[in-house]
Amino acid sequence: MSTQTGSAQTYTIREAAKLTGLAESNLRYYETIELIPPVGRDASSKYRVYTEADIDYIVSIACLSATGLSIDDMKLYLSNVDRGEDAASEQIQLLNDQTKRLIEEERGLKLRQKYLQTKAAYWKAVASKDLVLANQIAKQAVTIAKEVKLSQASS
């Protein structure tokens, strides 16, 4: 149940989780490992009370997390934000490295999709009793499977 203290809107952990897209357990964990600063507490219940600023900050962390950044990289990124211009080159490198990881991940996903489509084509050929085509497609599937295996080994 969100409340307004004075003019400031506050939120429970359940509401913060819903607003940020992170699980309550993630919010607690991120606070424990100091990825997010300590959250205020209600004076009487001692429950966490999130402000609009907390929510905004956590949303930025949720976005970083959604890109697949590791916790260590998120911490580095956030600490570099405070350094401003002095950290710009480090931030660019960190973000470019993650982009490269995502591109490689995408490549792997596309290969696996291609493998599945090839296997479906194989079974269509089998169902239509076209064994010549089925054998050709089976050879393609083996080649793609090797590519999938190699892409997983290099990641």
Image: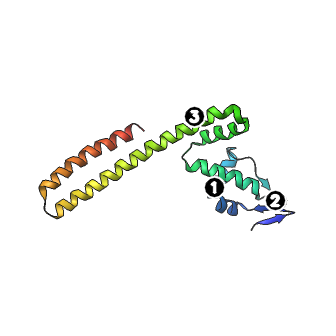
Q: Earlier in the sequence, mark 3 or mark 1?
A: 1
Nearer the observer, disc 3 or disc 1?
3
The label shown at residue 148 is: none
Quadrant, the N terminus: bottom right
Q: Which structural element holds mark 2?
A: loop
The label shown at residue 42 is: 2
Q: Earlier in the sequence, mark 2 or mark 3?
A: 2
Q: Position of residue 44 (x, y in %)?
A: 84, 61
> Which residue sits furthest bottom?
1
Q: Are marks 2 and 3 in contact (CB under 8 Å)?
A: no
Coloration mode: rainbow
* Residue drawn at the location 79% of the way across and 62% of the way down: 9
Name which residue type carries label 3.
Answer: Gln
Q: Position of residue 126 (x, y in %)?
A: 17, 60
Nearer the observer, disc 2 or disc 3?
3
- State the separation of the CA atoms marked 3 and 1: 30 Å
Instruction: Examine the rendering and report whether any part of residue 51 can be seen.
Output: no
Q: Earlier in the sequence, mark 2 or mark 1?
A: 1
Q: Nearer the viewer, residue 106 or 29?
A: 106
Image-based side of 12 in relation to 123, left or right = right
Q: Which structural element holds mark 3?
A: helix
* Residue drawn at the location 26% of the way across and 58% of the way down: 120
Name which residue type carries label 1.
Answer: Ser
Q: Residues within 10 Å of mark 1 (few under 14, many from 20)?
A: few
Q: Residue tagged by mark 1? A: 25
Q: Are marks 3 and 1 in contact (CB under 8 Å)?
A: no
Dividing the picture into quarters, in which one does residue 83 lie?
A: top right
Q: Nearer the viewer, residue 38 or 97?
A: 97
Q: Residue tagged by mark 3? A: 93
